[in-house]
Structure formats: structure tokens, C-alpha cells
Amino acid sequence: METEQEWFDVVDEQDCFIRKAPRAEVHQNGLLHRAAHIWVFNSAAELLIHRRAAGKEEEPLKLTSSACGHLSAGESYVQAAERELFEELGLRAELKFLHKIPSGPEIGYEHTALFSCHSDETPTPDKREIISYEYLNLNELKKQIEQHPEDFTNPFRLFFTWYLQSLPEVK
């Protein structure tokens, strides 16, 4: 049975569109492309993180953002974030743009935008994407990352470092 091929926008160092290419070509050749991460906070100000499934192509079994994924060809960062939030967690929420990190080898050659939202709805994780999830307060999450940085994806650690610099009250 043949599955539909995913297409990504190949971009340059400034995140400007160059052309469309199949996912396999983009990843095999280290072509620059785009991704979106979403952080879901609950009313207790805890952040939902999830453990990636074993079959994930990049950084399997590592802890990462609430939801994340590639932008499909022609898709905006916001559209991809809304889609990934629903596909991976079954949630819909108003998203707020937080930050963007430029692509590089340490983050899979992906220009990556981070969004946040607030929700107290119970997530329904896609078992093909997510093994488990939990909510952690930022201080506990900071301790876990300091003690075991290898347990977390590179983009998540970069975003979390940026976020802590934006919120000096987290010790």
C-alpha cells in the first residue's frame, strides 16, 4: 500500500522560499525547511511535555514540546502549529507566537517557530507520535533538563533556554 508523499518548502538561511521537495529528499540532503513547536500551559502554569514515539525519524524517545512538526509545502507557521496541536493532542486553542530559532544542523536544518496556548482540556495523544505526556512546573522542568539534558530534543532545550532568559523569576 502506497502512502501519500509529504512535501516541504525548501528555504534559504533567511527562511525565504526556494522550491518544494519531498520529505525524504529534504532530510537526506540536509536542506533547510520549517517546523513549528507548541507549548500548552494549563491553569496551574504547568507546561505539557511529551515523549516522542520510538519510530520517530528524528530524536526518537526524547522529551519535547507539547506538540511539534514540520510545515507542509505552502503552509504558514500558524497553520502548521494549529494542525499539529490538533493532530498530536486533539486540542484546539488560540495560539500566541513566542520565538523563532534559525535553522542549523543541531535542530535538523529547520527554521523553527514556537507558539504557546493555554488549555485545561484533557489531551488525546496520537499514539503513533507520543508515548506519554506530563505537565511540569517550570522549576521542575529546569531541574530535569539540567540533570539529564540528553533526555530532551535539541529544539526544546534551545527554546527552554530562551524562555528562562525571558522569565528571570524561574530559578
Image (cartoon, rainbow, N blue to C red):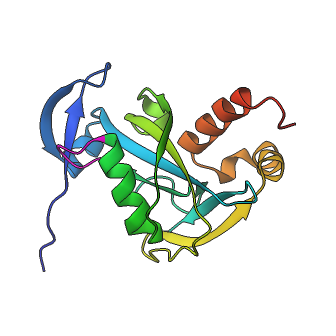
Q: Is residue 72 shown in magenta?
A: yes
- Farthest right residue in view: 171
Q: Is residue 149 left or right of residue 104?
A: right
Q: Could you say where residue 129 lies in the image, as x and y percent from the top left? A: 45, 68
Q: Is residue 126 left or right of residue 157?
A: left
Residue 83 in which image quadrant: bottom left
In the image, residue 1 above or below residue 116: below
> What range of the chain is rendered magenta?
70-76
Say which residue appears at 44% left-offset and 74% top-offset: 126
Say which residue appears at 80% left-offset and 42% top-offset: 146
In the image, residue 169 above or below residue 125: above
Of residue 133 and residue 32, the one placed in the foreground of this image is 133
In the image, residue 81 above or below residue 164: below
Q: Could you say where residue 153 lies in the image, as x and y percent from the top left? A: 57, 48
Task: Pick the quarter of the image with the C terminus.
Answer: top right
Q: Could you say where residue 48 lies in the image, as x and y percent from the top left? A: 64, 60
Q: Is residue 5 visible?
A: yes
Give the tally of numbered discs: 0
Say which residue appears at 64% left-offset and 50% top-offset: 152
